[in-house]
Image (spheres, grey):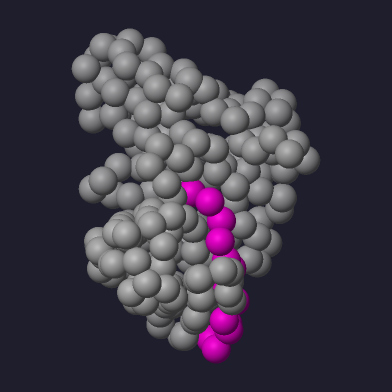
Amino acid sequence: EDQVTQSPEALRLQEGESSSLNCSYTVSGLRGLFWYRQDPGKGPEFLFTLYSAGEEKEKERLKATLTKKESFLHITAPKPEDSATYLCAVQAGNYGGSQGNLIFGKGTKLSVKP
Amino acid sequence: DAGVIQSPRHEVTEMGQEVTLRCKPISGHDYLFWYRQTMMRGLELLIYFNNNVPIDDSGMPEDRFSAKMPNASFSTLKIQPSEPRDSAVYFCASSLGKGKGQPQHFGDGTRLSIL
């Protein structure tokens, strides 16, 4: 069964304290791994797509990396405005109507204190 | 550019009442998805449409739930009759294609409370 597990559930950082969020997955034929950011009362906002092991993508203080079993979202010198829930999703490669569907983890809630 | 638009943003109603949630996808997007988000289960796909046609409704929890897409710019998710366990945030998302790595773009959701 396709599955996505994110850890930790919650993370508190001081401003400037770098850290990483983890996304472990099992999926039949990975077509893509997505990172989204979700602010309170808002919908998920797309950040990155990663396709294959070894790939990396960066945006401001965020860098996403991918291996065959997990992805990391590295946050360098975070600021309070980086506080949000970060969601990871995998795109299934199985056939039929569910092909290409996104399977989401439950997210990591990040709080950055000034 | 306008993103995915959902209405209402909040809905509070009593058990047994009919609830209708609305969604306007991004113009030009040919896929539309309905999700439900709860603390316990996270984001779950309920149903999706391609070119206004329902393709996969295996995530719809019960016959009380139904969804329609009468045209490319409008979709509804209806719950009749509603129950307290239906309380959740419901999101609509759209995408241009469903190919490898194609991201979905989400609206800001409808927070539904069934009393």
Q: Quadrant of the N terminus of chain B?
A: top right
The magenta stretch spans which residues?
A44-56
Image coords of residue B10 (percent x, y): 40, 22
The image quarter in which residue B26 lies: top right
Which sits in the foreground, A86 or B79?
Answer: A86
The image quarter in which residue A86 lies: bottom left
Image coords of residue B36 (percent x, y): 39, 40
Q: In percent of the image, x 73 and y 31: which residue is there?
A: B72
Residue B115 can be seen, yes or no: yes
Where B4 falls versus A1 (above or below)?
Answer: above
Which sits in the foreground, A39 or B41?
Answer: A39
Image coords of residue A50 (percent x, y): 57, 74
Q: In percent of the image, x 22 and y 24: which residue is there?
A: B84
Q: Quadrant of the C terminus of chain B?
A: top left
Is residue A45 within the magenta segment?
A: yes
Q: In percent of the image, x 49 and y 64: which residue is there?
A: A35
Image coords of residue B78 (percent x, y): 45, 22
Q: Is residue A2 toward the left or the right of residue A94 in the image?
A: left
